[in-house]
Amino acid sequence: MKLLIACGFGLALIGAANAQFNDPPALENRNGRLGFEFYMLEVPDPSSMTADGDASDWGWFDPEYTLTMDEWRDEADRPLPERDDYNVTTLMGWKGGDVNRWYVHMEIVDDVLCHWGTNVEQWHADMIEFALDPTDHGREFGTGWVMEYIARPGDMVPPQNVRYRWTGPEGWLENNEVIEFAVRVDPPEAWAAEVWDAGGTTYYEWNYEVKRFMEDGGPSASETFQLDAVAGEDGAGIAFNLWAEDSEPTGDDGDRASSVVNDMTTRGPEGSARQYYAHALLLRIGEYAAATSVEESTWAQIKDSFRR
C-alpha cells in the first residue's frame, strides 16, 4: 500500500555575514563525515519516474554513486549508530530541460520504529528533512533562501510552504504544484504504531521542481532554476542537504517518551557551524555508467546488498 507523507516546508533566511556568502567551506569540511563529493545522476527518462516509495524505476541508476551511511555524520558529532541499528541508503537524480526536478529515493532500516503519533513535529520521533539551496547560502541575491521539507509517516495533509524573504515570514502557500512525494513502511502495520519494536524499513521518495527564488505569487509565479546551467562533472553543482533523526523509546514501566538519539546529516562540521549545505555535482548521461538491461534485471539483488 502506497501512502503519502506529511511534509512541512519552510523557507529560511540565514543570518550570516556577507563575507561568508562568497566563502563556502572547503569540500572536506562541507560534505559529510568523509569530505567526499556527492553526486546526482541525470535521469534518462523522467516520464518513467514515479514518487511512490518503490525503487523499481531506479534500475538505470549506477550503484557506485549510492550515498551510504558511511558518508553521513551526526550534527552534534555523536557516534553514528551501528548499521544493524539504523542504516540509510540514498539515490539522487536530476533532470534539466523543461523538467528541472530533483529526484530522491531513500531507504531507512531501523531496529525500532518510533513514529509517536501522527503529528509532524521537528526533533520528535523518526523523521527526515531534505533541502536544496540554489543560491548557495546567499551567494546570489544576498539571501539564504532554501527549499526545505520535513517528512515522516503521519498526517495525510498537503505539503505547505512557509516563506521567509529577507527579514520575515511572507505567508503560507500550498506547494503541491512543484512536489511529488510518498512514503512506504514495511511492515505496513508499523505505519499506525507509535512504537514498533520489531523494527522495519521506511521508504521515502520525492521529486520537485527547483525554483530560483519563491516569489509572492507562489511557485507558478517564480522562475525555475535551470539545472542544466550548473550540470556536468566540471559544472558548478548545487547545494543540498539531508537530515535523518533516529528516535528510540526511553524510560521504565512503559514510559515511551521519545528521545532523538542521533540527528544525522550529509553536511560536514563547518557546513553545520556556518549553515552551509553539502554540495553535489550533477553528472550528465555519459558521465556515469548507465545500467545495462542485465544490470537492471538484477537491481533487486543490488538493493538487497545495500540493506546488509
Image (cartoon, rainbow, N blue to C red):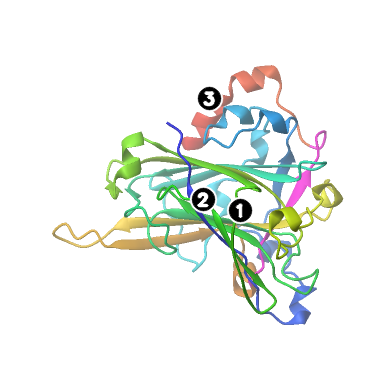
- Residue nearest the observer in this picture, 264 or 230: 230
Q: Upstream in the sequence, badge 3 or badge 1?
A: 1
- Residue nearest the observer in this picture, 307 or 115: 115
Inspect the image, locate mark 3, and give the three-letter code of the amino acid beneath it. Answer: Gln
* Residue to which mark 1 is pinned: 175
Picture layout, residue 35 above or below residue 66? below
On the question of residue 119 being in view, the answer is yes
Picture layout, residue 81 above or below residue 140? above
Inspect the image, locate mark 1, and give the three-letter code of the amino acid beneath it. Answer: Asn
* Residue to which mark 2 is pinned: 158
* Residue to which mark 3 is pinned: 301
Picture layout, residue 135 above or below residue 302? below
**Residue 258 drawn in magenta:** no
Q: Which residues are magenta?
A: 275-287
* Disc 2 packing (10 Å; few <14; some 14–19; many ≥20): some
State the CA–CA distance, disc 2 to disc 1.
8 Å
